[in-house]
Image (cartoon, grey):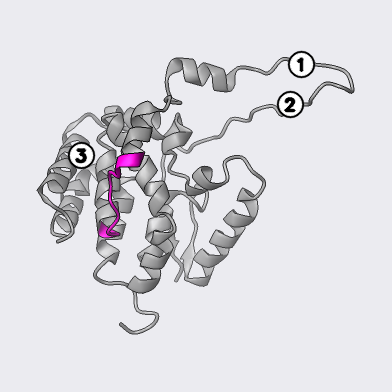
């Protein structure tokens, strides 16, 4: 493959997964069957993978749009453990997340990808759009660094019975990564979920105010604003 040539073989599949993982809208609903066709044709998928994909696609295509949008919010916006923001799984709320965002944004610009939406650069669908622009060997190198994150998200979604697990399963197959490693599957079955009403109450409970030089200081939590539409980045021409 000539250096600088987009990965024609892998790119359509990466773009299809990016769209399936995006916020459901009328455009996705209209083209979701086409995305299934792109992915179902991949030789890396087995019969079970294709059945999981078909179930996810049928749900996105045939369910009420508001229902699928509500499910997206319930799944991804209320649980950091399955967050679509990659650096959430690496840095959490650490200050190191900021420089990593800047570095990733610079990489996007260097490869001609202009961010024209309000999403952060580590938003997984946007990251997949970016890798689809790269030569296949380079794209796989970038994606390999996320393999352990994608595995954890997938096993957690599968444990929760979420149809959103299917695109992750397909993506991991494309990367030749085991979607359900035994150790992570056991971890997901044993860990406490962070999206239950009780767990959410604990997260957002206001810390008690204390006074005095000997008392530890606490940071107030901040809410994150999510757009109602989640457009992907676009190539910069």
Q: Where is residue 64? Give x, y as percent.
A: 23, 29
Do we see residue 62 in this rendering? yes
Q: Which residue is mark 3?
A: 56
Name the front one of labels 2 and 3: 2
Marks 2 and 3, Cα distance to the nearest angstrom?
42 Å
Q: Main secondary structure of the magenta part?
A: loop
Give the answer, above or below, for where 72 lies relative to 212.
below
Tell me whether the residue at label 3 lies in contact with that at label 1, contact meaning CB atoms closer than 8 angstroms: no
Magenta region, residue range? 174-183
Circle 2 sits in a helix, a strand or a loop, which is it?
A: loop
Q: Residue 201: x percent and y percent?
A: 53, 16
What is the residue that sits farthest to the right in this orientation? 213
Q: Which residue is mark 1?
A: 209
Element at badge 3? helix
Rendered image quadrant of residue 126: bottom left
State the residue lying farthest toward the left.
Answer: 47
């Amino acid at each position: 493959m000539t250096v600088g040539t987009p990965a024609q073989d892998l790119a359509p599949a990466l773009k299809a997964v990016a769209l399936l993982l995006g916020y459901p809208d009328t455009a996705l609903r209209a083209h979701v069957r086409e995305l299934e066709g792109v992915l179902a044709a991949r030789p890396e998928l087995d019969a079970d993978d294709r059945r999981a994909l078909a179930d996810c696609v049928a749900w996105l295509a045939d369910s009420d749009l508001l229902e699928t949008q509500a499910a997206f919010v319930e799944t991804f916006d209320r649980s950091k453990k399955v967050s679509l923001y990659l650096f959430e799984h690496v840095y959490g709320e650490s200050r190191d997340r900021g420089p990593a965002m800047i570095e990733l944004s610079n990489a996007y610009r260097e490869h001609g990808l202009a961010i024209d939406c309000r999403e952060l650069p580590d938003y997984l669908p946007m990251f997949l759009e970016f890798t689809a622009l790269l030569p296949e060997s380079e794209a796989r190198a970038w994606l390999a660094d996320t393999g352990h994150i994608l595995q954890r998200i997938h096993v957690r979604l599968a444990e929760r019975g979420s149809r959103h697990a299917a695109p992750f399963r397909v993506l991991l197959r494309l990367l030749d990564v085991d979607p359900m490693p035994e150790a992570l599957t056991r971890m997901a079955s044993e860990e406490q979920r962070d999206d239950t009403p009780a767990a959410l109450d604990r997260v957002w409970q206001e810390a008690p105010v204390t006074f005095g030089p000997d008392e530890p200081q606490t940071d107030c939590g901040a809410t994150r604003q999510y757009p109602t539409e989640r457009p992907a980045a676009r190539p910069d021409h």
